[in-house]
Every structure is written in structure tokens, then in C-alpha cells.
Image (cartoon, grey):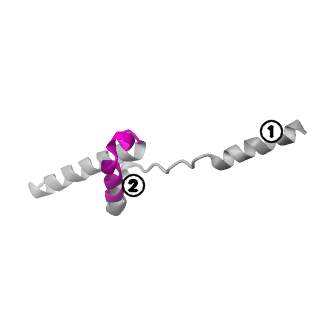
Amino acid sequence: MKFLVLFALALSLFGCSKKAERVYSVEELLADQGLLSKIIAKCRNNPGELRTTPNCMNAEAADWKARLKRMGKALGG
């Protein structure tokens, strides 16, 4: 009986746990500019809480790479 109660408690805790957000790589974000813009907007809207999350860090890196690429093209590179 105790096992059944503990099992039910454990099962309910798993149901309440927050699902982890998918982490996008820098390359995935570079390939999907819409997704990149969405993540950057979300991160810049709440930097105190989200700045150090993997998606925000990867989005900032992808944005920086994209800017460098655009600057290179503008300079004739």
C-alpha cells in the first residue's frame, strides 16, 4: 500500500514538472531568420531572467555572425 501511495505521488510530480525548452544551435538559427528574430525579441524583452539561457546565448551569437556576414558583403567581401 505504501508503495502505491509513493508511486502515485511520484507520478503526479512528473506530471507537474516543466517541459524543457528545445535548444537551437547557432547554425539552426542562422538558417531560420524568423526563429532567430523571435528568440532575440523574447530575450531582449526580459534580459535579466533570460540572458544566460542557452537559446538566448546562441541567438546572440547567430545574430552577431549574421551581422558580420552582412558587413562583409557590404564591404565587397
Query: How many marks overall?
Result: 2
Distance in Å between CA atoms under marks 1 and 2: 42 Å
Mark 1 or mark 2, whichever is nearer to me: 1
Look at label 1 and name its amino acid. Leu
Which residue is at the front of the view, 29 or 75? 29
Residue with the mark numbered 2:
28
Q: Which residues are magenta?
A: 37-53
Left/right placement of residue 13 relative to residue 50 reads right
Say if the magenta span includes residue 41: yes
Query: Who's the residue at 30% across and 46% down the image?
Result: 60
The residue furthest left is: 75
Q: Name the secondary structure under disc 1.
A: helix
Query: Who's the residue at 32% across and 61% down the image?
Result: 33
Query: Who's the residue at 36% across and 52% down the image?
Result: 27
Q: Position of residue 76 (x, y in %)?
A: 9, 56
Which badge, 1 or 2, comes first in the chain's sequence?
A: 1
Left/right placement of residue 72 relative to residue 27 reads left
Q: Position of residue 2 (x, y in %)?
A: 87, 36
Residue with the mark numbered 1:
6
